[in-house]
Image (cartoon, helix red, strand yellow):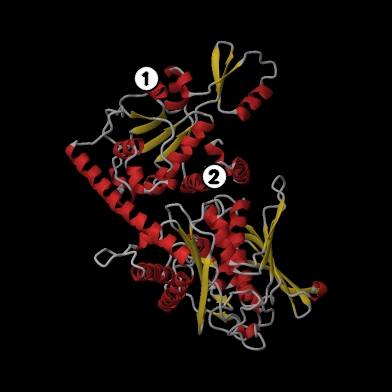
């Protein structure tokens, strides 16, 4: 059974009723403005974009109900966002409980009002979105609602955090007899840290929505000066296309994508999965189109059944002998890309941001469907099934080897006291709060850094060339790598699940690499390592990238340093008569210790970039997708994400 936009009308009454009586009031918007984080997670970029998701999710709900086939999202030149759908349109009649107010006004101004609380408006939806659209209104300086319904065009305007500026009124006939809802809003600058939307963030979310709703057309348009673009998403293969998209730049273990669906009264599941030759699992779960980034019952059921199905198959074919242990779930999921999409009438999410699904009944459905349908698929595709078993066997062996290597590392550290690497030039301070670790590329640069450092608070760890790409290596191989071992020992807080951020020996771990392509490659590899194996180090704000200058020149007798080509151009514009030559500092080894200290190591003079989790994740994505030989693909990725990957300096 395919989950198609056109087919998702099951459970809907014959007339498709969605009238004013379907809007249920549960009851002011002041709590939202007082504590916005409770409703949108934060007032930073994540919370800002959450406003877009709330409005778009309402339109997607219309698609899941079988009424909307197209959604248009526009980032306006004046900083606003417009979302248009061709669904039924929010009901505009007076509400039975509040006859003096239109149902549409209630939805926008009352915190717990919407068509998703048990009325007849929606059988399947992305949760209690009557809360969501009112939150958008509360956190906007202005919001304009347009509803095309019953042949008429209705308009209402709200301002100053959700206060009605003009009541809902008919302004004329609906254009060309269309139906649907248009919401245009401008985020309140007094609430948010910044109000500029990021096109790439919106595009990624819209593409996922198109993948999850087979046949739904989503159009994106950016009208902001200097950012103009138009993109359309529509996928006839649904989540099968999603899996292919995620695995496009990876080497597939086999070409087929396994997919299956199952439904019962009030809920349904669709799953697509495919393995690649990599070593990391990538499972994405959704409930009614909402990304459940923390998983939940549907993901638990899938993982349990996947492990059972593959182990049963392997034992049945003799690949696991009688006295041998079963594969663990992590063995089977190595290199797996999977999409789990469930739809149910009454989703129980944890919190308004809906990170985790709690419905026990959906776990049973997903588990049953995976046990039955995946077992059938494995029997019907023995070539692919054998490759899955072979990969799981290698993963199990690597897991045992990694445990042995990790135990050996622990024992060695206990025997050697601090267990510090021999090449580490440590600082004398034992206070992590003032201590800094510079990870320096090459011995020559390490020598300069050693001379330039403050020996009391600054430690130097030279590494040789490019470290292992942990995205493309199993953990047992990673733990045998000398450079990785040195990093683990120097930082002193363990690895992966054993990592204890309270034990780190330095509160600044600074990547100091050349200002060239090789240096950017090294930065990317190191950030990927920290993101995957020491994530709390990044989350705590302890990881930095030093930004050494690329050029130097003389102004009189004073040496001036310039970070990059853009800085050089700006300098020449300010000094049009400058005659002195520019020296290109290709490597840290070319800088004497005075230059290195003055530009890169001395607080107050140096330029450091504190790495965010998002930036480290982007570096990880570069390692995962773009460290191959496809230069054009890499260039396209960098251009698309130019603002965010600038710190990598590709």
Looking at the rendered image, the quarter that the C terminus falls into is top right
The quadrant holding residue 120 is bottom right
Mark 2 vs 1: CB contact within 8 A = no
- Is residue 379 visible in the rendered structure shown here? yes
Q: Is residue 470 above or below residue 116?
A: above
Q: Is residue 483 left or right of residue 631?
A: left
Residue 473 or residue 389, whichever sits in front:
389
Residue 23 or residue 634, whichever sits in front:
634
* Secondary element at image label 1: helix
Q: Earlier in the sequence, mark 2 or mark 1?
A: 1
- Is residue 144 visible in the rendered structure shown here? no
Q: Position of residue 554 (x, y in %)?
A: 58, 14
- Point out the residue furthest to the top here: 557
Question: What residue do we see at 69% from left, 77% from top?
Answer: 88
Q: CA distance from mark 2 to mark 1?
A: 36 Å
Q: Is residue 421 left or right of residue 109?
A: left
**For mark 2, what is the residue?**
626
The nearer-to-camera label among 2 and 1 is 2
Q: How many marks?
A: 2
Q: Position of residue 314 (x, y in %)?
A: 36, 67
Question: What residue do we see at 27% from left, 46% from top?
Answer: 405
**For mark 1, what is the residue?**
451
Q: Is residue 542 above or below residue 320?
A: above
Residue 283 or residue 578, whichever sits in front:
283
Looking at the rendered image, the quarter that the N terminus falls into is bottom right
Q: Position of residue 394 (x, y in %)?
A: 36, 54
Crowd around label 1: few <14 · some 14–19 · many ≥20 (10 Å): some
* Secondary element at image label 2: loop
Crowd around label 2: few <14 · some 14–19 · many ≥20 (10 Å): many
Could you say which disc has been placed on residue 317 in the image? none
Q: Position of residue 506 (x, y in %)?
A: 33, 37
């Amino acid at each position: 059974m395919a989950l198609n936009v056109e087919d998702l009308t099951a459970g809907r009454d014959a007339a498709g009723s969605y009238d004013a009586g379907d809007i249920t009031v549960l009851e002011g918007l002041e709590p939202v403005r007082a504590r916005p984080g409770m409703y949108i997670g934060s007032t930073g970029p994540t919370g800002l974009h959450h406003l877009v998701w709330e409005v778009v999710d309402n339109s997607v709900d219309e698609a899941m109900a079988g009424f909307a086939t197209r959604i248009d999202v526009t980032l306006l030149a004046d900083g606003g966002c417009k979302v248009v759908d061709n669904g039924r349109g929010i009901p505009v009649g007076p509400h039975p409980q509040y006859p003096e107010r239109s149902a549409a006004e209630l939805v926008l101004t009352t915190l717990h009002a919407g068509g998703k609380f048990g009325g007849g408006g929606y059988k399947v939806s992305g949760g209690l979105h009557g809360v969501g659209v009112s939150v958008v209104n509360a956190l906007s300086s202005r919001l304009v609602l347009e509803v095309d319904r019953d042949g008429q065009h209705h308009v209402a305007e709200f301002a100053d955090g959700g206060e009605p500026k003009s009541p809902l009124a008919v302004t004329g006939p609906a254009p060309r007899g269309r139906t649907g809802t248009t919401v245009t809003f401008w985020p309140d600058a007094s609430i948010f840290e910044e109000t500029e939307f990021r096109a790439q963030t919106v595009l990624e979310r819209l593409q996922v929505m198109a993948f999850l709703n087979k046949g739904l057309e989503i159009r994106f348009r950016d009208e902001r000066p200097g950012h103009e673009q138009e993109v359309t998403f529509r996928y006839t293969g649904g989540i099968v296309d999603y899996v292919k998209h995620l695995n496009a730049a990876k080497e597939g273990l086999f070409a087929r994508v396994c997919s299956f669906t199952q439904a019962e009264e009030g809920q349904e599941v669709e799953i697509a999965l495919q393995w690649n030759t990599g070593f990391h699992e990538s499972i994405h779960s959704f409930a009614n189109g909402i990304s459940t980034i923390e998983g939940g019952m549907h993901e638990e059921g899938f993982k349990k059944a996947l492990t059972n199905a593959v182990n049963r198959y392997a034992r049945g074919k003799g690949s696991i002998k009688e006295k041998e242990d079963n594969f663990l779930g992590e063995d089977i999921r190595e290199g797996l890309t999977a999409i789990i999409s469930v739809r149910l009438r009454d989703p129980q999410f944890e919190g308004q941001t809906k990170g985790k699904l709690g419905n026990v009944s959906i776990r049973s459905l997903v588990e049953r469907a995976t046990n039955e349908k995946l077992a059938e698929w494995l029997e019907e595709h023995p070539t692919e099934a054998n490759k899955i078993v072979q990969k799981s066997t290698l993963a199990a062996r690597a897991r045992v080897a990694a445990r042995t290597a990790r135990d050996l590392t622990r024992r060695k550290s206990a025997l050697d006291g601090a267990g510090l690497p021999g090449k580490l030039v440590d600082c004398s301070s034992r206070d992590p709060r003032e201590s800094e670790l510079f990870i320096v590329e090459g011995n020559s640069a390490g020598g300069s850094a050693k001379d330039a450092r403050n020996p009391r608070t600054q430690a130097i760890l030279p590494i040789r060339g490019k470290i292992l790409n942990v995205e493309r290596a199993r953990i047992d191989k990673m733990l045998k790598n000398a450079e990785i071992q040195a990093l683990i020992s120097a930082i002193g807080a363990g690895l992966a699940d054993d990592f204890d951020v309270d034990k780190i020996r330095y509160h600044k771990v600074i990547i100091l690499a050349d200002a060239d392509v090789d240096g950017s490659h090294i930065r990317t590899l190191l950030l990927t390592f920290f993101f995957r194996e020491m994530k709390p180090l990044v989350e705590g704000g302890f990881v930095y990238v030093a930004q050494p200058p690329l050029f130097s020149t003389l102004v009189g007798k004073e040496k001036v340093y310039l970070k990059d080509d853009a800085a050089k151009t700006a300098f020449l514009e300010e000094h049009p008569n400058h005659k002195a030559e520019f020296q290109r500092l290709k490597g840290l080894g070319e800088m004497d210790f005075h230059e290195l200290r003055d530009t890169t190591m001395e607080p107050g003079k140096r330029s450091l970039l504190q790495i965010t989790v998002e930036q480290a994740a982007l570096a990880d994505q570069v390692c995962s997708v773009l460290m191959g030989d496809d230069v054009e693909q890499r260039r396209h990725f960098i251009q698309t994400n130019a603002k965010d990957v600038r710190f990598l300096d590709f």
